[in-house]
Image (cartoon, rainbow, N blue to C red):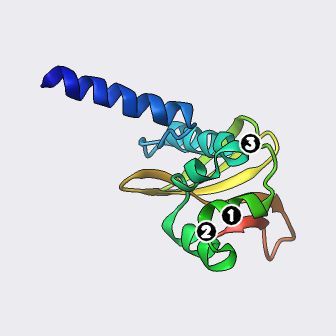
Amino acid sequence: MKRIRSIAAVVVCGYWALAGCSTGDSPGPAGAGQAAEAFAAAVTGQPDAACALVAPGTVKELVDSSGSCAKGITDADLPRAGRALDVEVFGLDAIVRLEHDTMFLAFFDSGWRVTAAGCTPEARERPYSCDLKGA
């Protein structure tokens, strides 16, 4: 029975790794960077897998505006973000600057989740404008 559980765990973990869905379980900067990179990797070919890395409020906004999370991610036409260059963590929130994108994340019981992506710097009153964001 132990062997079956071990095999099942390997299969599940392997699936998530192939899907690019690291959950970023660590509340520190490394976990936030991993989650942002996993989300970025899943966006282009696996929007359903990317949805697993999106914060609940952002999922709700995507469903309300596009009918489904996956369609909302596809409609957002996010850039190919690349790898994480800089991660700043502020308690349970993080900003991850990638090669071609900036993402905001929040830490939940299930790990780091993307709250906003496709973000570009704006004027002082409104520091970032994001293509994908929650309410």
Are dots 1 and 2 in contact, CB under 8 Å? yes
Quarter of the image holding residue 129? bottom right
Could you give the CA–CA distance between mark 2 and mark 3, rounded to whole angstroms? Answer: 26 Å
Which disc is residue 68 wearing? 2
Residue 14 lies, in percent from the top left, at 45, 28
Image quadrant in which the C terminus is located: bottom right
Label 3 sits on a secondary structure element that is strand
Query: How packed is label 1: few (under 14 Cα within 10 Å), some, or many (20 or more)?
Result: some
Could you give the CA–CA distance between mark 1 and mark 2, rounded to whole angstroms? Answer: 5 Å
Label 1 sits on a secondary structure element that is helix
Residue 87 lies, in percent from the top left, at 63, 43
Image quadrant in which the N terminus is located: top left
Label 2 sits on a secondary structure element that is loop
Could you give the CA–CA distance between mark 3 and mark 1, rounded to whole angstroms? Answer: 23 Å
Three-letter code, disc 3: Leu
Q: Residue at x 47, y 33 (%)?
A: 15
Residue 5 lies, in percent from the top left, at 22, 29
Query: How packed is label 3: few (under 14 Cα within 10 Å), some, or many (20 or more)?
Result: many
Which disc is residue 71 wearing? 1
Residue placed most toward the observer, 18 or 34? 18
Above or below, comparing residue 123 to residue 11 in the picture: below
Which residue is most to the left? 1
Task: Determine whether, in the image, residue 118 is placed left or right of residue 111.
Answer: right
Three-letter code, disc 2: Ser
Q: Residue at x 74, y 52 (%)?
A: 102
Nearest to viewer (mark 2 / mark 3): 2
Three-letter code, disc 1: Lys
First in sequence, mark 2 or 3: give its number.
2
Which disc is residue 34 wearing? none
First in sequence, mark 3 or 1: give its number.
1
Mark 3, residue position: 98
Residue 101 lies, in percent from the top left, at 78, 49
